[in-house]
Image (cartoon, rainbow, N blue to C red):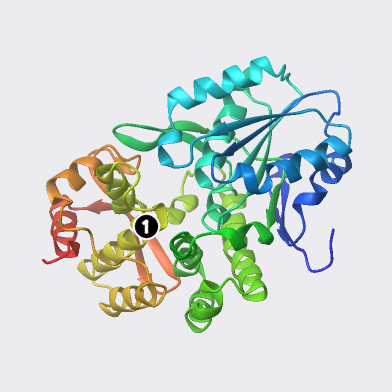
Amino acid sequence: MASGTRELTVELGERSYPIYIGTELIARTGEMFAERGFPVKSPILLVTDSSVVGLYAAKVEDSLTASGYSVTRAVVPSGESSKSLAMLDDLVEAALKAGLDRRSTVIALGGGVVGDLAGFVAASYMRGIRFVQIPTTILAHDSSVGGKVAVNHRLAKNIIGAFHQPEFVLYDLDTLMSLPPREVRAGLSEVIKHGLIWNKEFVAWCDENADKLIALEPDALGYALYEGCKVKSIVVSRDERENDLRAILNLGHTIGHALEAVAGYGELLHGEAIAIGMIGSARLAARFGYSETIAGETERIFRKFGLPVRIPAEFKTESIMSAMLHDKKFLEGQMVFVVPTAIGSVEIRQDVPSSWVSEIVDGLREGI
């Protein structure tokens, strides 16, 4: 591996896999496939989106072709709307036409939408084939690790899916340099989240290095993504299928996913919705007797990164609450929330009164 590349391992016994974080990695895709014994005779489906295809698809394909692999490209529209059963059907058809077999591989080249969608194709095609993640956004440092793959239903996000771990994750930092500023900030929301649930020292480091991270300074960015992926890999290694511990990774997601659903999966970026959700969870913590300073500190950090901290006024509290009832974290009639007990520490509460949540959501709306 190239000098300066950071490497982590998601420890899952025989299904353990590495995460590589560094520069100039895409050009080595074919070499890495060969080193890891991917069969040359089995075709590969490269799934990417309309925003990424012109930037990096040819580089991945050229590297694989040079190593003797046959690659078919499938391009989906950019955006959350591509995480649909209709698009899944299109990609399965593309896989069939390309002649993918049980030893074939699906590659996800793109952000979290492409990773979730392509991963679900791999999980469902012939009851499961190999899968490789090549994330091209900061936000995807979270979604590319851990094997959660899914598509959306019109009533709920990620409600149709599976657990299907990748063979490896190839995180080339060079691909992040083309990201629009808004996507950079939204992606950093999930980086900060990993500190908020696990490592207060990392939160302090992010606070001190906010300007470097927003400017995509390579050393700072590489370190931040390594630390974020490290938290995710530790948690997934201990609880792959979200039986208990892994649920802490959902900090901010109960409100955040509801906001995305109400917005129609487009007006708010995922990281933006989750940032607002994390502030809501911090306010909820005060209802359980934890320090009110948690909410203030969480909001201050997200403001520093230029992230939204209020719900748009046109999003009605009733609609947001209705969307939450379809969330996977609504359990046996109780609302389930990940609640911070301090910066860097959380707990899972299954006894959250819906009246508290409604009041907090209403208080987070702009102009309220």
Instruction: Answer with the quarter of the image where residue 19 lies.
Output: bottom right
Please name whichever residue, 350 or 168, is drawn nearer the observer in this view of the structure: 168
Question: Which image quarter is the C terminus in?
Answer: bottom left
Tell me if residue 15 comes above or below residue 224 in the rendering.
Answer: above
Tell me if residue 203 comes above or below residue 43 in the rendering.
Answer: below
- Is residue 226 something one can see in this rendering? yes
Q: Position of residue 287 (x, y in %)?
A: 20, 67
Please name whichever residue, 29 or 20, is drawn nearer the observer in this view of the structure: 29
Question: Which image quarter is the N terminus in?
Answer: bottom right
- Is residue 10 something one can see in this rendering? no
> Which residue is at 64% across, 71% downward?
223
**How many numbered marks does the figure carry?**
1
Instruction: Answer with the quarter of the image where residue 152 lies.
Output: top left
Q: Residue furthest bottom?
A: 208
Q: Residue furthest front?
A: 54
Q: Position of residue 2 (x, y in %)?
A: 84, 62
Where does label 1 land, which residue?
274
Tell me if residue 130 comes above or below residue 235 in the rendering.
Answer: above
172 with respect to 37 (left or right): left
62 with respect to 181 (left or right): right
183 with respect to 53 (left or right): left
**CA neighbours of label 1 inside 10 A, class few (<14), some (14 to 19), many (20+):** many
Q: Position of residue 127 (x, y in %)?
A: 62, 20
Q: Amino acid at mark 1?
A: Ile
Please name whichever residue, 304 or 363, is drawn nearer the observer in this view of the structure: 304
102 with respect to 135 (left or right): right
Q: Position of residue 222 (x, y in %)?
A: 65, 68
Instruction: Answer with the quarter of the image where residue 101 lies.
Output: top right
> Which residue is at 43% across, 29% downward?
84
Question: In terms of secondary structure, where does tag 1 sit?
Answer: helix
Please name whichever residue, 341 or 76, is drawn nearer the observer in this view of the structure: 76
> Which residue is at 45% across, 72% downward?
344
